[in-house]
Image (cartoon, rainbow, N blue to C red):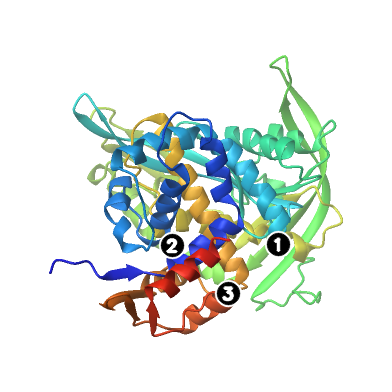
Amino acid sequence: MNAEGRKNFGYAAILKIYHELSLDDFFKNKARHEPFKYNTNSIMMLLTTSRLLSPGSKKKAFEEKGRYFERFDFSLADVYRALSHFAKVATECQRYLHEQIATKYGRNTRTIYYDVTNFYFEIDEADDRHNSIVQMGLAMDADGIPLHYELFPGNKLDKETFRSVIGEVRKKYDTGRVVVVADMGIITGDNIYYLTGGKNLNGYVFSFSVRGGSGTFKDYVLNSADYVETDGRPAKEDADFKMKSRRIARDINVTLSSGKTAKKTVYEKQVVFWAKKYADKARAQREELLKKTKALEADPQKYTLATSYGAAKYLKNLEVDTETGEILLATLRPQFDSDGYYAIVTSELDMSDTEVIETYRGLWEIEETFRITKSTLEARPVYVSREDRIGAHFLTCFLALVILRLIQKKIAHRFSAAKILECLNSIACSNEQENIYLFDYRSEISDVLGNSLGIDFTKKRLRLGEVKNILATVKK
């Protein structure tokens, strides 16, 4: 009567990676000389496992601790107290994790991917609940495994976060020469010179705005001459994909230590490509916005700034009532049709066009990483308000994300993050009778995971002693 007999067993896969990374040793050692008595390693195991299998608040994780076979001997108050400790060791933990991954899995840091995203968190202040924003700048290695992150205030510009994160990676992670890949929000003269000027002889692969480029650059992009298909033959008119490149000298503005601006010349390769599938998608999106824009131009007073969202970039001479937000005048801006065209600039002059494009496409890995963090792992909203606890929350998300990516690496990326987590949640059992647990799930994914991690997920029944033996084995 009233017994909770259902247990998850898929979390054994998470513990396998957690202990391969020796995170248990790290958290035990860091707590050795602290005055508190609770087990910080046990708390982090629960928080990381819950972040992957049942994301939510710290309170929710604590309340659901009975779904695992572990003895979690701590209170909810201990969990909240431990967050301050986790925040204190977060930076050191990232470096420790890097060393473990480099030694046990191998790290490819010749290419570093960088991106920034916003997270919001709920905070209570004088009985007034409101949302605040924190930014995460994340660097990933060439395999898409997170390397280092930093948190910034929500009003920090993306381009201003770049040197802090990349500088930390260069100083503390022993990467050697790196080529940094990032989107156009990062591409400033200062950031390019930071990588390539003076003694910092690193490289970059950055996206470059076609729509925002000079008239000369747009003419080059739209000129059909010199475009080739992937096999190197001149591109046909009905080709689904085409590309071309050129080497140029380009002047960039660099801020000097005195605060003044000086022009520096960089020698770079510009790679332009066009893809039909992207063009079709962009054109459909643009047509919808243009319909709205034309209606707005015909009768602007029907709209406000809020209701015209997305259409503003197609307008000029925009006049708005500052009190009501009502649009008084709007004129359609002449359109430059760049649908499907993309441009990339790189310091790597000898890199082939195909290699440049493929290297930049790797940035979509980091965008997927942020999507996983925000959706699958539900990193937002953050249900804590103190700065140290916010820091601890993101350390938990970071560890969960690293473990998930390493599981994917172990199975050669055969399945998506969402499919893996769905499977691990489904590997569960019921207490059929005393000390005997009945399992009711098996799939292709569970077999692949089990074979890759050395965990037998194929048994229909296991005695409690056998379950504990398997869990003891994955913790070695």
Image mark for residue 423? none
Q: Nearer the viewer, mark 2 or mark 3?
A: 3
Residue 290: x %, y % from top left: 40, 57
Image mark for residue 454? 3
Q: Which residue is mark 1?
A: 357
Viewer-proximal residue among 412 and 72: 72
Tell me which corner region of the image, top left, top right, bottom left or bottom right, holds residue 226.
bottom right
148 sits to left or right of 385: right
Residue 312: x %, y % from top left: 40, 45
Query: Label 1 is placed on what type of residue?
Result: Ile
Image mark for residue 285? 2
Crowding near pointer 1: few (<14 within 10 Å), some, many (20+)? many
328 sits to left or right of 87: left
Query: Label 2 is placed on what type of residue?
Result: Gln
Q: Residue furthest top?
A: 258
Tell me which corner region of the image, top left, top right, bottom left or bottom right, holds residue 301.
top left
Does the rendering let one see residue 107? Answer: no
Instruction: Give the distance between the C-alpha atoms of the residues marked 1 and 2, in whole angstroms.
Output: 24 Å
Are dots 2 and 3 in contact, CB under 8 Å?
no
Are dots 1 and 2 in contact, CB under 8 Å?
no
Query: Label 3 is placed on what type of residue?
Result: Gly
Instruction: Give the distance between the C-alpha atoms of the residues marked 2 and 3, in whole angstroms.
Output: 47 Å
Quarter placement of the N terminus: bottom left
**Rendered residue at 45%/52% (across/down):** 45
Q: Residue furthest left?
A: 1
Residue 207: x %, y % from top left: 65, 51
Q: Nearer the viewer, mark 1 or mark 3?
A: 3
Tell me which corner region of the image, top left, top right, bottom left or bottom right, holds residue 37.
top left
Viewer-proximal residue among 73 and 446: 73
Viewer-proximal residue among 90 and 212: 90
Instruction: Give the distance between the C-alpha atoms of the residues marked 1 and 3, in whole angstroms.
Output: 37 Å
